[in-house]
Amino acid sequence: MSVNTKGLIVTEDLKKYYRNGEIKALDGINIEIDKGEVVVIVGPSGSGKSTFLRSLNLLEIPTSGKIFFEGVDITDPKTDINMHRRKMGMVFQHFNLFPHLSVMGNITLAPIKHKIQSKDEARENALRLLKRVGLLEKAEAYPSQLSGGQRQRIAIVRALAMNPDVMLFDEPTSALDPEMVGEVLEVMKELAHEGMTMAVVTHEMGFAREVATRAIFMDEGRILEQNTPQELFSNPQHPRLKDFLSKVL
Amino acid sequence: MGQFFENLKDTFVLNFIQEDRWKFVTEGIKTTLIVTLCAIVIGVIIGIIVASVRSTYEKNKEEYAKRGGFGVFLLKVVNGICKVYLTVIRGTPMVVQLLIMYYVVFVSAKNGVPVAIAAFGINSGAYVAEIFRGGIMSIDHGQFEAGRSLGLNYFQTMVHIIIPQVIKNVLPALCNEFIALLKETSVCGYIAIQDLTKGIYIIIGRTYSYYMPLLVLAAIYLIMVMLLTWLVGKLERRLRSSER
Ligand SMILES: Nc1ncnc2c1ncn2[C@@H]1O[C@H](COP(=O)(O)OP(=O)(O)OP(=O)(O)O)[C@@H](O)[C@H]1O
Ligand SMILES: [Mg+2]
């Protein structure tokens, strides 16, 4: 088993092809994300942002390349990916809450099934986290009874309940009504300030400028430019990035 | 008018009271219910297994292609067997399957009931499998991904996240399958089982009166189907109430 002791997440020449290489969703990604970093990923539609994020916890199986998480090559078929996924929280654009379970059920399912916590401990932990995001009174509600912003905050809590070492966010506010974006970003900002390592695909430039330690621009499956968010957005070098920013700003 | 009711009563007495002929009806109902209920249980078990194999294979094809190994090869073979099973069962008439089961597979069987249970269970399993597979495939893929991203393995994700949602979704289709199965058991007579239909047939053979036994036969099936529908409806409401 190859071991890498550098960053929390390191990828080496990560590639993901579809249709026998006709579509190069990821075309050689080399990146190192250190503990405590908040990395924001931007880029045009179809540039491979989601594929990259989803490769990090192997929801997509890379065509080639390596991914080291906490020093272990998780692309090695011999590693137990479920053990590593416990340490990588993921938040989806469409929340993906479990509709047949209450908020409490959603949050405590994984910690209880993994026997990380007893039922009581898991519930206590869930209540503590719910309080933090201001949804304590929704503990027994079902997802269908919640607004989009509330659902996404619950989804974040569900991921946090596993005590992850890194949180992956794939456009967490894109499916929300504008007036609900703020409440979700607020929770994410708080997480960032507490030192959580985060990788966030988002179009929220304000969020990026405020909390990101690094911003990455992707296009056609590659990282074309990376810098502090201030520099990347105010002083773009690559023509593609200039073009992209002129469209979104 | 009085004459009419007098006739009705006589026919009833002739067909069901004389020589205790009602026993053909009660014994028949018992046999029909035993065959149906046992076949439902077998069918659901087979159905869930086949649907799990098929959808596991379909959902993880990509990953398996990369991983290889004996386990994956085995799954591929089992998946192939399941496909053949579905094709053959759904492509041939139930009566033919029943006859083959009785006269070819279990040649030495003395009692037809277990043979019928096996035949109907295996037959129903194919339809239940397709219902479940459709149900599993209709669940938003994001549900799988959310489960897996929390570190639950494939099996845990299926048991705790997917299957509970599938059951709720497929209950109406399952109910239809159970009703079809109940009615289909009326061909049991082909292998000398005295189910409800056969019992009524025996009565007709002795009394030579047709209309009343046949109408009673239809009415009893109807009542059994309505009971089954009511039961499933109750279950459905209970499942739904847990969500809201
Ligand atoms: N399952 C798949 N099969 C074939 N092609 C795919 C598949 N998933 C993604 N792709 C392709 O891979 C490329 C990258 O997709 P990806 O979803 O990562 O882009 P993205 O940057 O997240 O885009 P968006 O901003 O629209 O979410 C696209 O061209 C997409 O069409
Ligand atoms: Mg995307």
Image (cartoon, coloured by chain):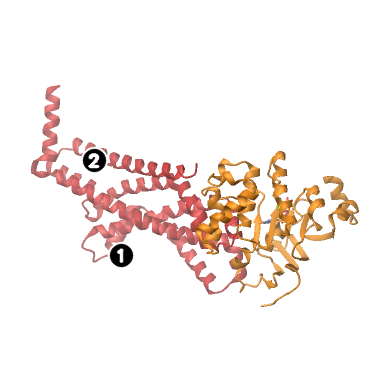
Chain colours: A orange, B red
A79 in relation to B197, above or below: below
Which residue lies most toward the left here? B19
Residue A247 visible from this viewpoint: yes
The image position of residue B127, as x and y in percent, is: 42, 52
Residue drawn at x 73%, y 74% as measured from the top left: A5
Q: CA distance from mark 1 to mark 2?
A: 31 Å
Residue B217 tag number: 2
Q: The residue under label 1 is which amino acid type?
A: Val
Lower position in the chain sequence, tag 1 or tag 2: 1
B129 in relation to A84, above or below: above
Residue drawn at x 32%, y 39% as measured from the top left: B226
Residue that numbered label 1 is attached to:
B105
Which residue lies most toward the bottom here? A1
Of residues B115 and A60, which is closer to you in this image? A60
Of residues B244 and B70, which is closer to you in this image? B244
SS state under label 2: helix
